[in-house]
Image: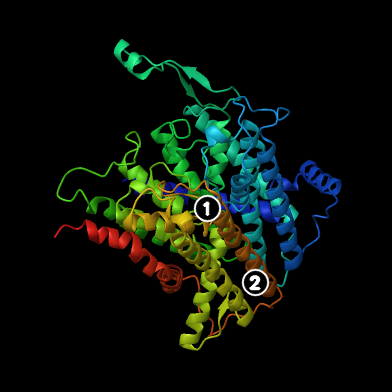
Amino acid sequence: MIFIIFTIVLVALAIPMGSYIAHVLEADGTILHMNWLSKIEDRFFALIGIDAKQDMDWRQYCMSMLVFSFIGLAFVYLIQRLQGLTLMPANPQHFVSVTPALATNTAVSFVTNTNWQAYGGETTMSYLTQMLALASQNFLSAATGIAILAALTRAFKKQPSGLGNFWRDLCRSTLLILMPLSIAFALLLVSQGCPQTLSPSQAYTPYLSTRQADASGVQTQQIAMGPIASQIAIKQLGTNGGGYFNTNSAHPYENPTPLSNFLETLAILLIPAALCQTFGVMTGAKKQGWALLAVMLILFGAALCAAIYGENALPLAGSNMVNMEGKEVRIGEDASILWAVATTAASNGSVNAMHDSLSPLGGLVPMFLMQLGEVVFGGVGSGLYGLIVFALITVFISGLMVGRTPEFLSKKIEAFEIKMCSLVILVPPIAVLIGTAIAVSCEAGRSAVLNTGPHAFSEILYAFSSAGNNNGSAFAGLSANSVFYNVLLAIAMWISRFWLAVPVLALAGSISRKRSVPVGAGTMPTDNALFVMLLIGVVIVFGGLTFVPALALGPIVEHLMEIKP
């Protein structure tokens, strides 16, 4: 029942949210028409020397995005390296500066919207680092994804048009979409018991019997505090996923109640689902947006069913028990499975249960969802533009099979577009599989796993699937805070974010220059049930089958080994 309620609420909220986002990005009928707000926007851009009213071509848009991301990378790295200096404020625990390799990994992770964490937040990062460096990138990296999607969406308009302005899209996505939602959601989390304070860690003396006190020798514990609610709000809404605490959303301060658990799970998928409606509104083809949302929902539902089966098939077959290993009792099995599927369908990465403790088949599902390219909702912006790429490939293949001209929303899909699409779908598997091969071939890679056999391979494959698809979740059985993994995973994260974003913007530039062609007898509909099924097939074949041999060495063989003859 929880799954049905979740889906209904998600769709009901996504439709109006998507329409609002479209109006914000196009400044059509929103509060942006208010003179005072428009003047503030104009003066802000004038102050920093940017003409935000000028449309950019794809090269200008791409260069602005890359320069902005490089500046963000340097800023996040610098804040971490300077953290331990006495002049740096908001460090009541007096945490030392972060090491170069870990600082590099973390900076790349947050700038790429991955939020992979090789550290424990409450024992490593000061309040200043959490708020100024990491939380700011939670907003800005998510807004960058929305901006890239906006540029691609404008390319499909009926008449040739520009791609918009990166700085304008970035500003509006941050201030009018992500910021208001995060403030409202943070207040909801505070109402559920999520702390929001700058006070230092609190000393706590638990009740112990005399014998327990004598045996432990310690009667006082330190409970980490901090500006938690504000960090959790944007980490979920921006599909970032970086946890304030090491145990992420399994920690009662990050996820205090069943209601907060439901709301946080909903927040993970809300904007990615809403952007399907945004795409339909901005292109004037709402049915196309609904078709893309239908693809996401069908794949999500299938993955959810597979995960439920996997968690109940082994090793507790024949009993009335459920697999509660690695799960919070206050959350339960169903809510933990729903979160595991949602967080890996989206490019979120937060967890409320340890994926390393899932059954082999249960752990396969989150891994496979990432390996699909994170297009089942995916990251904010990046998930939908990834699915649109698969839609273009589907149109091209279908056109070849039936002899029709490949068209999508009245724009012809030709050789250059398919080359760019090929880059988008090939780069993540290359990053994942090559990274995994290097790790299992080196002692530095093998020595970090806490298990042996197929499960050890699964831990490494999961880590690179997460980094190579900008997810950020972990199997929790890999000691990744080493120079080897910090550097290798940072490379995978950087490649999978920007070696995809650049071809997508080049694709947008090519499509925007094409004249719209009239719909005729040779035009294949792309907003009906047949196309939805074709697109699902292409996503599974191209996105998933690439990893079947690797999965066979990990979770599949582990499952077969647990079957008792």
On screen, residue 95 versus residue 347, left or right, reads right
Q: Secondary structure at mark 2?
A: helix
Q: Secondary structure at mark 1?
A: helix
On screen, residue 271 versus residue 360, left or right, reads right
Mark 2 to mark 1 CA distance (whole Å): 33 Å
64 or 461, nearer to the observer: 461
Q: Residue at x 33, y 59 (%)?
A: 555
Q: Label 1: which residue?
A: 485
- Mark 2, Cα crowd under 10 Å, few <14 / some 14-19 / many 20+, is many
On screen, residue 151 versus residue 387, left or right, reads right
Residue 132 location in percent, x, y? 67, 37
Amino acid type, mark 2 = Leu
Amino acid type, mark 1 = Tyr
Q: Spot the residue most to the top.
A: 210
Residue 406 location in percent, x, y? 55, 81
Q: How is the image coloured?
A: rainbow
Mark on residue 507?
Answer: 2
Q: Residue at x 42, y 40 (%)?
A: 262
